[in-house]
């Protein structure tokens, strides 16, 4: 895979409207994606820690973009994803690192681990990802 593909994936990810609510950074390389987010009080649940949706978003996004790094043709989508949260986060920055762990034909399996700013593991997830019928080349946001 080429660095142009990785940069195009990064641009595609950052162009998603949801990322105006949760403004992340992303780095994609072969079989891996790393996403960081500065925690804001607006992301909190009633217990003053980040809502489970934030954990899921970063874990799933980093895993699906790690999987996407293996396909320059077809957009990869989440078929299933499991999230396990181990610690609440109330401030600072979190980083989710997604990695492809297995490829079986069209099926891509990836896992992701989220860390707080002190590099403590706070959550992990794993999922199955499949190519869709959408081509990257058909998306305006997939450009360098």
Image (tube, helix red, strand yellow):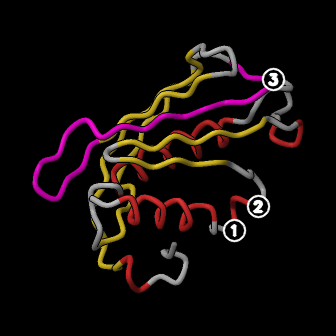
10 Å crowding of disc 2: few (<14), some (14-19), many (20+): few
Q: Secondary structure at mark 3?
A: loop
Q: Which residue is mark 1?
A: 17
Residue stretch in magenta: 88-109
Q: Are marks 2 and 1 in contact (CB under 8 Å)?
A: yes
Q: Which residue is mark 2?
A: 20
In the rendering, at what x and y percent does residue 56 appear? Answer: 57, 41
Q: Residue at x 76, y 61 (%)?
A: 20
10 Å crowding of disc 3: few (<14), some (14-19), many (20+): some
Which residue, as the protein is rendered here, is positioned at the far front? 3
Gap in Å between the C-alphas at discs 1 and 3?
A: 24 Å
Q: Is residue 115 left or right of residue 66?
A: right
- If you read the primary sequence from the N terminus, does the residue marked by circle 1 or circle 3 appear first? 1
The disc at residue 90 is: 3
Is residue 89 magenta-colored? yes
Q: Quick check: 25 above or below 6?
A: above
Query: In front: 22, or 137?
Result: 137
Gap in Å between the C-alphas at discs 2 and 1?
A: 6 Å
Q: Residue at x 70, y 40 (%)?
A: 37
Which residue, as the protein is rendered here, is positioned at the far left? 105
The disc at residue 59 is: none
In the rendering, at what x and y percent does residue 2 appear? Answer: 32, 61
Q: How many callouts does the rendering have?
A: 3
- If you read the primary sequence from the N terminus, does the residue marked by circle 3 or circle 2 appear first? 2
Q: Are marks 3 and 2 in contact (CB under 8 Å)?
A: no
Give the dominant element type of the magenta stretch: helix, strand or loop: strand
Q: Is residue 52 left or right of residue 76?
A: right
């Amino acid at each position: 895979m080429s660095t142009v593909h990785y940069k195009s994936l990064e641009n595609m990810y950052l162009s998603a409207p949801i990322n105006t609510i949760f403004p992340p950074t992303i780095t994609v390389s072969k079989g891996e994606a790393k996403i960081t987010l500065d925690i804001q009080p607006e992301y909190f649940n009633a217990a003053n820690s980040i809502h489970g949706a934030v954990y899921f978003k970063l874990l799933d996004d980093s895993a699906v973009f790690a999987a996407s790094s293996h396909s320059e043709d077809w957009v990869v989508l989440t078929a299933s994803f499991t999230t396990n949260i181990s610690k609440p986060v109330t401030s600072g920055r979190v980083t989710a690192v997604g990695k492809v762990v297995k490829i079986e034909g069209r099926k891509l399996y990836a896992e992701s681990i989220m860390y707080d700013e002190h590099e403590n593991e706070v959550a992990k997830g794993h999922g199955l990802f499949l190519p869709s019928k959408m081509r990257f080349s058909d998306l305006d946001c997939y450009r360098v």
